Image (tube, helix red, strand yellow):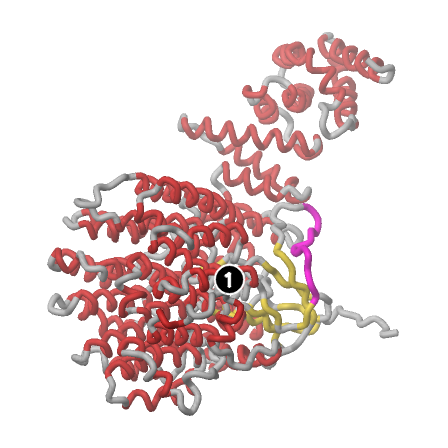
Amino acid sequence: MSEEDLPLKNELEMLVERLKEGNVDLHRPTLESLRTLIRTSTSSMTSVPKPLKFLRPHYATITEVYESWLPSDNKLFLADILSVLAMTYEEDKRDSLKFRLQGSSEDPGSWGHEYVRHLSSEIGQEFNHRQENDMESEDLIELALEIIPFFLKHNAEADAVDLLLELEIIDRIPQFVDEDTYARVCRYMASCVNLLVPPDDCLFLRTAHTIYRQHNKFTEAITLAIRLGDRDLIKEDFDAAGEFDALLQKQVGFLLGRQQMPMLIEDEEIQEILNNTHLTKHFISLAKELDVFEPKTPEDIYKSHLENIRPGFTSGTIDSARQNLASTFVNSFVNAGFGNDKLITIEDGNNWIYKNKDHGMLSAVASIGMIMLWDIDEGLVKLDKYLYSPDEYIKAGTLLAIGIVNTGVRNENEPAFALLSEYINKPIHQQRICAIVGLGMAYAGSHRIDILDLLLPLVSDSNLSMEIASLAALSLGMIFVGDCNGDITSTILQTMMERDPAQLKESWGRYMGLGLALLYLGKQDASDATLETLKAIDHPISKQVGVLVEICSFAGTGNVLKIQNMLHICNDHLDKEKDDDLHQAFAVLGVALIAMGEDIGSEMALRTFNHLMHYGEPVIRRTVPLALGLLCASNPLLNVLETLSKYSHDNDSDVAINAIIAMGFVGAGTNNARLAQMMRQLASYYHKEPNCLFMVRIAQGLLHMGKGTISINPYHSDRRLMSPVAIAGLLSTIIAFTDAKTFILGRYHWFLYFLVTAMYPRFLITLDENLNSLPVTVRVGQAVDVVGQAGRPKTITGFQTNSTPVLLAHSERAELATEEYIALSHVLEGFVFLRKNPDFMEEDKD
């Protein structure tokens, strides 16, 4: 023992001896000395403080002394000291807490941070013990509420939240937070939500929402209200924002417009913001700013001269109609939203339409809708002449195009409803289908009852083909996404029970199921009754639809138990002759759909897919690439690209086709150069296989979607919010690939257009108070998770400084480079209002 330690040890032993003596007058000064020695002992962070170390052997003795004393102030004082000493004594006895509750009620924080943390862990253990034995816990809750202010003052917000969660009183935290701590508390609480079980997850969101509202942080509050899916709360926040600050209400309006939350407001200007009317104007000006307004041809995308095909092997073997069809899609995705191209919106665009056959003409005309996306007035002018065409396919394509143009944008004249509703009951099959699908796209997420009255009879009419009934169900699912609508649910279930088993076996059955599943998107346990009813249907479809409903209910929640459940379904080896195995394909997609909202879950899902690819049945292997495409939409992670590139050469042509299109989903709108090169290699590899080549071309079109400005990732607002409408579109497209030969490679290639509901520009545009673009310098870099970090950590890394408008990739975040302006949104993404900072002083320019 060192020389300075010895006197300390001797002094402490002497003080313990004094306590044992009967002289009561000496007890008080002795306790004072002990307290001073313990409190002033500062040793390194990693070792036990010296006084506690030397007093440890005497712990039992001091406890006996304590028991022998009569009740007095000194006895309370000694209990405090024993509570601190107990930290180093036996772990599981919870003595620190026992003596603390018996001691004087002085501030626990005065004994230091380590003591308070130790105490809080014992409070949690004791609380659980008492809960199991039905005992009262009021004294524990009181003590916890004394500790909370200490945690909040000392940058330990996470400990405060954890303690209140343990005691099931998290709703008490708003009274303790102040201007300095609320942001960190809420950030921590919001990041915990994915890891909590119901009902704690909703309670956390509501509590954080309350705190944000106390501090008038409306954009943060409404983000949480959207995550809760509580329409009344959203409306209340929106109105409150308007009373607080008119410009802030417009900012909140942009957020709701991005989420496609329908709302009717008196104020015309705000209604336009909610209707996304400004989207097309700003998107075009962004294109001019970035110098990508000039239209591109499919050949600009394919760069065929770089494909190493031996001369003489050119397009002789390839069906030219199939090639033209691929070019139609590529042209529409690449020039989406720009309002111009070089194939079809030009003077003699009709020539291109007639280069396609029947259903190809339908897709060609529909592509005009994609090129004119978000620009309703111009788009309808361009489409008008095709409405009078005698050719039923051209007319049908026009109806689909009207639906596409109106996607994500509302217009008070309701042109889509007026034009499409009159074709819903027309006898011409193709036009009827396109009108149904067009309505579903144009009004996705709008919860419009008048469209319900139009489409619901089509679902229940058993004389109609399964195709019409299923597409009507799908459109209703998209329009009422996440609404749990009882009428639609009961009608779809009733139809499944009444339909002929042979009809339910058709490939269309999956879309009727998807329509039902979308009603419960993200609603977790709300689908329980529906799942029970499905079990009563005696047909394989009940299993498939059951899986679909379950995966949609838990989409984006990261719920580990549900993911395990889906893997369990993939585990069964079914007899192909007797059993239908489509539900296994949906279970694979379910793993991606449930895990996609949460980073750690997504990483684990990637590893899981690797295993499924090795050991799964053929149906599972075919679906894994699609699941990867869903999990990483518009997020070209290198390891995922490598994996898909490997699968794209698989012996099973279905696996290869799905891997190729998944590469398109993963790279959608990113212009990723590595992926572009892989695609060119695939094009030369498959130059003799029309189906695979067709897919490669489509994937190339997706990669360059909007010339690299449009994303299909369903997450926005710093990846906090999931857009239900985007998920609906992605799922509708991806499920078509579970039977690609019938749908995409058959006559229903236009199912690719369902992606339109997930398409949105990946821009940041800063606006002044009059809604005009206001260029400012921003830093754009990789987002860093700063939850729970002390001080003011950097939120981005490896940044570049640009002037707005700028494009943001999947994991990037932007922040203002100077303090000249204050942003009204907490996330710099999409449209953001800026206001001059009154405290900003411009330095002298010299």
Q: Residue at x 29, y 83 (%)?
A: 394
Residue 24 location in percent, x, y?
Answer: 73, 13
Identity, as a three-letter code, of the amino acid under mark 1: His
Residue 460 location in percent, x, y?
Answer: 16, 66
Tell me if residue 795 is in the magenta stretch: yes
The span picked out in magenta is 790-801
Residue at the spot of label 1:
716
Closest to the observer: 785 or 836?
785
Please state if 329 lies on the left or on the right of 530 as rendered: right
Q: Residue at x 52, y 73 (%)?
A: 707
Circle 1 Cα neighbour tier, 10 Å, few/some/many (<14 / 14–19 / ≥20): some
Q: Residue at x 47, y 65 (%)?
A: 309
Q: Residue at x 35, y 66 (%)?
A: 690
Quadrant location, the C terminus: bottom right
Please state if 608 lies on the left or on the right of 827 as rendered: left
Q: Which quadrant would residue 439 be assigned to in this image?
A: bottom left
Q: Secondary structure at mark 1?
A: strand
Residue 437 shows up from this direction: yes
Compared with 542, 716 (above or below) is below
Q: Which quadrant would residue 235 be assigned to in this image?
A: bottom left
Residue 427 location in percent, x, y?
Answer: 16, 79
Compared with 788, 241 (above or below) is below
